[in-house]
Image (cartoon, grey):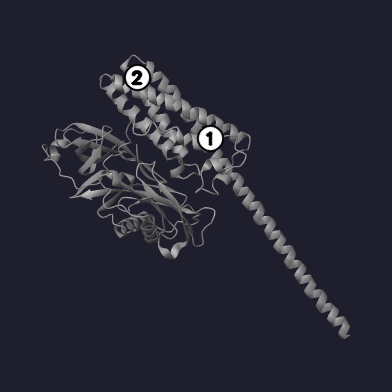
Amino acid sequence: MKDFLYKLKKNYIYGILILMIISIIALGVFLYRQKSKYVIQTENQYNLAFYEMVDYVSNVENYLAKSIISSSAENGAKTLMHVWREANLAQAYLSQLPISSNELNNTAKFLNQVSEYSYSLATKCINNEDITDEELNNLQSLYDYSTNLNGILEQLVNDMLLGNISWSELTKDTDIALAQQVDNLSSSSFSNLENNFGEYEGLIYDGAYSEHIESTTKKGLTGEEISEEEAKNIAKNIIGENRIKEIVSNGLIENGNIVVYDFSVKINDGDDNNPMSISISKIGGHVVFMNFNREILENKLSQDDANNIGKEFLEHIGFNNMKETYYLNQGNAVTINYAYEQEGVIIYPDLIKVKIALDNGEILGIETTGYLNNHEERSFPTTKISEEEAKEKLNPNLEITSSGLAVIPTEWKTEIFCYEFKGKVNDTDFLVYINAENGKEENILVIIDTPNGILTQ
């Protein structure tokens, strides 16, 4: 009897163990299939964004070719507006690719500059102003670079089709040069993509609000030169030592807009194959760039919460008097543009971008190039027209909701002291800038209120 009970108990235990093993295997198979499904969906999304970007860059080249030979102001304006539109769309799809801004910074910047330069020339055509020989030469240079860019993108398309490049590989080691990430890559296409913009640097200027004017004087880059070890300590303080598992130096980067010490940082509870990138300026020890990507499943914080978290972070690392302007919410992380505020005047050239996780308020990124290039205390000119006089310059259909003073940059590396009016016409929101010295209408921006954020165009 005892033997029978013992065998029965033994078989029962074996049965439980077998059921547990089967359950574990079934769970593993389920999770594997879910992960595979997610990877396929993600690859498809990246492929769609990539091929859309390639198409729009091709359109940029075609319209630039037409703009060079256009002889009428009316047609020239139309063609240049097409360049502006296609370059903006190319930028939008480029931003969706899982490649850090360090690696494709020059490509994104080139597209932005093509967009802004074509827009400024289109405006001249609309105003019946002649395009100078120098401006035509600049268009020719832009066309030459766009042709080169298209050639390299065609090679990348071939590499994608042949399976030599996969987005899953590119997202594993973002701290390594992209050209070295895939062993069977037929040519170092991504590296070529960046290297070919060496001569182009500084040809024309960045956009007024979403990007920054580059300054050779670096007005905001104050302080003495620091060592790599000092830069590492500054990086630790910005990130928070309690978040850091390991920090590795990538050396001194001297070929960018600002000379920086660059570091890769493994974050506690983060993916070691997807480290944080952070760059600290050699002069003054200012943070120039930081970015960390992680999965964010929840959206717990309001936009006001995020605005305050970003502002407190900026104050903590020495950037005071910053005011939130526009923002973009993607993947439960929000990127907020903060502009410097002096005596109640918004200084748009002094721009800082901060990326914040909306599940716990973690600071995921910062970019301070605009601020470091341009920041200084301004001496504002005397307003020669009153705010009421400036309002008289506006379209009478504009229903004004707010107004104030602002400094805006131009494509000619100058700044304009303006009245900024926010208003609405037929359910569309606008920002209109009236020169505070001469009453000229300097710029009009459309405010786009999307589910993902408030943007301008």
Helix, strand or loop at mark 1: helix
Q: Quick check: 125 above or below 7? A: above
- The residue type indicated by label 1 comes to Ser
Dot 1 corresponds to which residue?
Answer: 189
Foreground residue among 442 and 180: 180
Foreground residue among 123 and 253: 253
Q: Is residue 60 left or right of residue 424?
A: right
Report the quarter where the N terminus lies: bottom right
Residue 277 placement (x, y as % from top left): 44, 51
- The residue type indicated by label 2 comes to Gly
First in sequence, mark 1 or 2: give its number. 2
What numbered label is drawn on residue 283? none
At 68% from the left and 60% from the top, the residue drawn is 27
At 27% from the left and 34% from the top, the residue drawn is 444
Q: Is residue 254 left or right of residue 435?
A: right
Q: Quick check: 187 above or below 5? A: above
Mark 2 nearby-residue class (10 Å; few <14, some 14–19, many ≥20): many
Foreground residue among 338 and 248: 248
What numbered label is drawn on residue 76? 2
Residue 236 placement (x, y as % from top left): 40, 60
Residue 250 placement (x, y as % from top left): 45, 51
Q: Quick check: 25 above or below 104? A: below
Foreground residue among 197 and 122: 197
Helix, strand or loop at mark 2: helix
Q: Is residue 445 left or right of residue 92?
A: left
Residue 398 placement (x, y as % from top left): 24, 36
